[in-house]
Image (cartoon, rainbow, N blue to C red):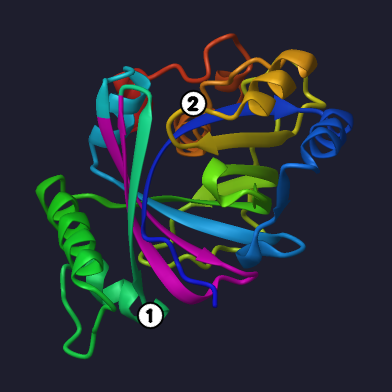
Amino acid sequence: MKKETISFERFEFKYWLTEPMVKQILDMTSSYLRCDDWALGGQRNTSLYLDSSDHDFLDLHVQGAPDRSKLRIRAYGSPPSGPAFFEVKRKVKRVTFKDRAIVPMDAVPALLRGEIPSTLRLKSAEEQRTLDHFLYLMLVHRAVPQVIVSCRREAFTSIDPAEEVRLTIDRDIMYQPARGPTLVGDPSAWIHLCGQGNYEPEASSLIELKFRGSAPLWVGEVIQKLQLSVSACSKYVMAMTMEELGPDALTGPDLAQWPPPRAARES
């Protein structure tokens, strides 16, 4: 029986690849990876990101703070349906920690108003702690919905469970300004992010390699053979940068030019 994982601790490395390179990496890893049980054949995921009016979380990310967090709510399907995952994602130096609380989709608006529905029951004390922490950070920072980011994702996981490697492929990455406490966007308002911040416009697929502890030898061999270069890519940073500064902000060597001039923020 499939069981949702609600806590993660791992290294995450991202790469922009062309479609021929995606095929190469899938061919090279076919002996080590299989399709993830939760995403057989791929699925669309959508994330609602929260931040303060001063962009506290975003600024820490762009400044490369050694300890930084972000708040997001993720759901799956097109349009998003089923449960919503309240996530506190924290990066300490090079290690990423992620905790999730799974709640009904119809509870999202109330929770984002700081209200706890009387009927809300989480499956474990661990999830309750995560939701409490999410709401605490949201209230302390006065964080509100900022942008919705969506993509089509294929996911693969280790055939050997002991290796604990995960590979995801994100395509058709797009965003739009948040429309309040909902993950459902305006179908006509999506803005594409694929290939932004990369010198090769055709490299429109974002690959993420994730693993705990030391990576198996085959991971290093794949990276070396394909000469992959790590990208300091964050979908939230890209979306917010384009929203504040326009698409030209992501065409240079730096992924984001932040913060924008005060006039740009206030216009």
Label 1: which residue?
104
The answer to which of 2 and 116 lies nearer the viewer is: 2
- Residue 92: which quarter of the image? top left
Residue 156 rendering spot, x and y as whole percentages: 67, 50
Residue 171, placed above or below residue 7: above
Of 167 and 53, the residue lying toward us = 167
Q: Amino acid type of disc 1? A: Pro
Relative to residue 111, is residue 217 depicted above or below?
Answer: above
Q: Do the residues labelled 2 and 1 touch (CB within 8 Å)?
A: no
Kind of residue indicated by mark 2:
Leu
Residue occupying the far right of the picture: 20
Residue at x 31%, y 73% (from the top left corner): 109
Quadrant in the picture for the N terminus:
bottom right
Q: What residue sits 18% from the left and 70% below the top?
A: 125
User: What kind of element bears circle 1?
Assistant: loop
Q: In this view, does 136 lie above or below 124?
A: above
Classify mark 2: residues with Cα within 10 Å, few (<14), some (14-19) or many (20+): some
Residue 200 part of the magenta segment: no
Please give the range of residues in magenta: 68-92
Residue 61 locus on image (x, y percent): 34, 27
The first of marks 2 and 1 along the sequence is 1
Q: Nearer the viewer, residue 112 or 17?
A: 17
Q: Say which residue label 2 marks.
A: 245
Q: In this view, does 132 lie to the left or right of 34?
A: left
Corner quadrant of residue 107: bottom left
Q: Could you tell whether 264 is left or right of 194 in the image?
A: left
Residue 133 visible in image: yes
Give the residue furthest to the bottom.
Answer: 119
